[in-house]
Amino acid sequence: MDNSVTHPSKILKYCPFCGSKNFHWDGVKSHCCADCGKQFYTNAAGAVIALIVNQKGEYLFTTRRLNPQKGKLDLPGGFIDMEETAEQAVVREVKEELNLEVETLQFCCSLPNQYVYNGLTYFTIDLVFRCQVKNLLSLSAMDDVDSAKFLSLDKVNIDEVGLHSVKVLVNKLKNNELYDSLKTSMSRSL
């Protein structure tokens, strides 16, 4: 992804600690202030994605109401709030966006993403969960979701998907690679 204009190294010009203009990108992951000596790191923010599948094996896709990628296909989810677990975030996001109550969930995989908002690139780590919901009859597009519909993966045009991590995830699902990534991630020693 090209973030040559929106990357934090191009946007952040002043030290948030002392206000100095002597604030420089280290070329890797942080800004350093030559005046106060402090570093400001560009870390990945936590986000979640929910995979909700109906009886026909179709996935619940949403259409984004807002930028970035307004009007493009997405999967339910969003940022993890402060003091919130990833599991709490996916339950909250599914309720806020779709008026659905998550009954059970299972971690699937994680994917890096870049989310450009208001001219600044935010780096995220998207945690993907398979979610079972209580009752699909209460499905309603709300919050930052314009619409929601179940789609068979073979009907999803990858060019209509907005966010990079969701494109990667859809391709993994189409190619039956999610099970392999789940198996690999669970077999890693910590």
Image: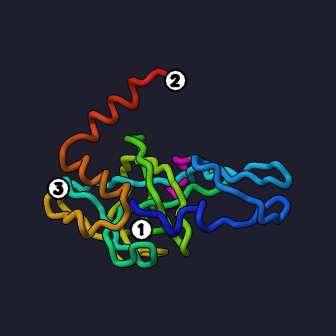
Residue carrying label 3: 56
> Marks 3 and 2: which is nearer the front?
2
Q: Position of residue 115 (x, y in %)?
A: 48, 63
Q: Earlier in the sequence, mark 1 or mark 3?
A: 3
**One can see residue 165 in this view:** yes
Element under disc 2? loop
Locate residue 97: give its quadrant: bottom left
Whether residue 13 sits left or right of residue 10 in the image: it is right
- Label 3 secondary element: loop
Q: Disc 1 marks which residue? A: 98
Distance from the alpha carbon under mark 1 to that under mark 3: 19 Å
Q: CA distance from mark 2 to mark 1?
A: 35 Å
Residue 135, horizontal then vertical, whole percent = 35, 60
Amino acid type of disc 1? Answer: Leu
Of residues 55 and 168, which is closer to you in this image?
A: 168
Q: Is residue 78 left or right of residue 82?
A: left
Q: Are marks 3 and 2 in contact (CB under 8 Å)?
A: no
Which residue is under mark 2? 190
Image mark count? 3
Residue 32 is left or right of residue 42, and the answer is right
On the image, the x and y values in percent for residue 77 come to 45, 60
Q: How is the image coloured?
A: rainbow
Range of residues picked out in magenta: 86-93
Amino acid type shown at disc 2: Leu
Q: Is residue 108 above or below residue 185?
A: below
Dot 1, crowdedness within 10 Å: few (<14), some or many (≥20)? many
Q: Does the magenta stretch mainly form a helix, a strand or a loop? A: helix
Q: Position of residue 101 (x, y in %)?
A: 44, 58
Report if the CB atoms under discs 2 and 1 are less than 8 Å apart. Answer: no
Q: In terms of depth relative to the viewer, which is nearer, 109 or 56?
A: 109
